[in-house]
Amino acid sequence: MKKLLLVAVFAIFLMTEMNAQAYEYKVVTSVESIVPNGLGRSRIVSANDSRDYKEFTSTRSEDKKEDKRNKSNRSEIRVKNFDETKLLNFFNLGGIRFQNIAANDAVISSKLTTMTEEGWELAFVTSAVESAGGKGDNNGIFITRYIFRKQK
């Protein structure tokens, strides 16, 4: 009986290892302007090209002999093939526009639904705000990154 149990546990372990698969990730970013008077720009952006981070990475160390400076060209990182979906700004001349927020929610929901219909799973969501830093600072964005994954 103990041997049978041991064989069963071993078989389950092997099946789990065989089912473990790598994921492909895709990031979709929404940038919503919180600039007063509706002067900002709001968009959903997602890259259609991929980049290998290793091409733009160097390893630094205290040992100057081993230290290699990253000499990659920034223009090689730039992605020119991407989707850009217009969103509405949070503010207009009258102040905050709740209709614009609801409209953006509808457009973002549509994008998220389409991604899941295409086989992507929403794995992580992270957001941040850079808002007015005091008198005279009219800059501000609300940024959200939706990180999707699907098995390769």
Image (cartoon, grey):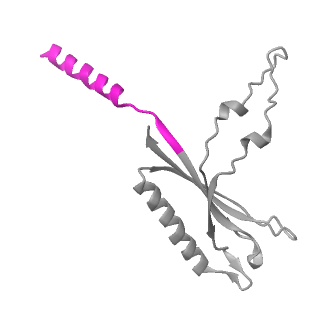
From the image, which quarter does the C terminus lie in? top left
From the image, which quarter does the N terminus lie in? top left
User: Which is nearer the eye, 51 or 66?
Assistant: 51
User: Which is nearer the eye, 134 or 41?
Assistant: 41
**Displayed quadrant of residue 28:** bottom right
- 22 inside magenta stretch: yes
| Image: 57 above or below 27 | above
Tell me where residue 141 appears, x and y as whole percent: 71, 64
| Image: 58 above or below 122 | above
Tell me where residue 16 appears, x and y as whole percent: 32, 28
- Outermost residue toward the left in this view: 1
| Image: 54 above or below 11 | below
User: Which residue is pictured at 83% across the width and 14% down the height?
Assistant: 65
Question: Quick check: 116 left or right of 18?
Answer: right
User: Which residue is pictured at 59% across the width and 49% down the height?
Assistant: 48
Q: What stretch is highlighted in magenta?
A: 1-25
Tell me where residue 7 appears, x and y as whole percent: 20, 17
- 112 inside magenta stretch: no
